[in-house]
Image (spheres, rainbow, N blue to C red):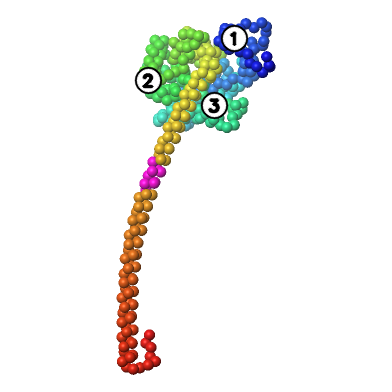
Amino acid sequence: MRGGDYVPCPAALGGGTLELRGHVGFDGLPDQLVNKSVQQGFQFNLLIVGETGCGKTTLINSLFKTEFEELEGLEERTHFTPETWIQSATYDIQEKEVCLRLRIDQTVGFGDAIDRSSSMQLVTDYLNKKFEEYLQEEISITRRRRAFSDPRCHACIYMITPCHNSLKSLDFAMLKAIHKSVNVIPVIAKSDNIDRSTLKKLKINIMKELQDAGISTYNFFTEDCGELQAVAPFSIVASNEVIDGRRVRIYPWGTVDIENEDHSDFATLRECLLRYSIYVRLYFFVTEDTYKAKKTQQQSEQKRREAELRNEFSRNVCTKQAELETRKAEMAALHERQMQILTREYQELLSKQDNLEAQLEEVRGFLAQSQQSKGKRGINWL
């Protein structure tokens, strides 16, 4: 057998699993993947949408058990500015040997204006812009895979203020506008402001309203999360106050431990979001599926637009050709009329010329006769 000859093994012919007689080395592939991932680090882009004063910054601080100083004070400053914008900040955080680049996009002044359509348009335009940036990088000739940072929003925590028995019209319209562009996680903010029976009724009404409208939210149901999806939308309580290593909210009538599942769903939210779903499901599966759907939609829209442009161009060409043919026929008819006029005038001029020449001959004949009759010589009148 020559060295270049290929001899198929039984597995290649549809046989069973082969047993190795010694160590080969590819059992270290998972470790290689883990080491490479740890060296490269991970990235997570989180969008927080909610009205002013609903506790967006406090929730972020509580989720990651730290203080994001750049985000402090945004809630207070927005009461004095009519504008609505998205505050974006990127942080490098580390837990044990795992590094995470966290980008927090937080709405500022959302829902404060009388005309709230601008707030909705701001968020939808921002999400579309990030998808467009990623798409342009993917289709570019020279890609910057190592230097390029994924701009897409991997998840959106939408904070609902519990002041109604169901969703506000703004919340409903906003969720309907963005649920196909990002993984939406609805949460009920400051849930300690309402009693348990009202909170339970509010959860049921919200989920029913979302399901009836066909608004999809991120599904946490996995083998690891178990039945935790049943508590959605999460009713949360967040706090910046730490006592004895616990984040709590202190009231005159008692203390609320935000980690206590009897008090809120905050611990469940963090468990599902940061422990089980942050990278594998949110980043690779759901975000990629959303991006592919968005890309397919954009490509379909682009093809439809190209077809419309081609049809419009063809119609314009046909219209222009018809106009040119009509103009050509008009010019030909005009030329024919002008030629007829010129021919008629030319014939009239020829007739006049013949008449003048005949008259001239008569004059010459008359003069010749006069000259002969008088017998004069040497006089030539012409």
Picture layout, residue 333 above or below residue 83? below
User: Which residue corresponds to mark 1?
Assistant: 10
Q: Callout 3: helix, strand or loop?
A: loop
Q: Magenta residues, as a range?
A: 315-323
- Dot 1 crowding, Cα within 10 Å, few <14, some 14–19, many 20+: few
Q: Looking at the image, which is closer to me, 366 or 137?
A: 366
Mark 2 and mark 3: Cα distance apart in space? 29 Å
In magenta segment, residue 317: yes
Q: Which residue is mark 3?
A: 151
Mark number, residue 213: 2
Residue at (67, 10) in percent of width and height: 24
Is 252 above or below relative to 379?
A: above
Q: Give the quarter of the image for residue 319.
A: top left
Give the spatial CA distance, label 2 vs label 1.
Answer: 55 Å
185 or 55: nearer the eye?
A: 185
Mark 2 residue type: Ala
Q: Amino acid at mark 3?
A: Pro
Side (left or right) of 50 relative to 165: right
Splitting the image into 4 quarters, where does residue 51 fall?
top left
Q: Quadrant of the N terminus?
A: top right
Which dot, 3 or 1, sits closer to the camera? 1
CA–CA distance in space, label 3 to label 1: 47 Å
Residue 48 drawn at (x, y percent): 49, 22
Sequence-wise, which precedes: disc 2 or disc 1?
Answer: 1
SS type, badge 2: loop
Query: At which x and y percent is residue 207?
Result: 40, 15
Q: Are marks 2 and 1 in contact (CB under 8 Å)?
A: no
- Residue 166 seen in the figure: no
Amino acid at pointer 1: Pro
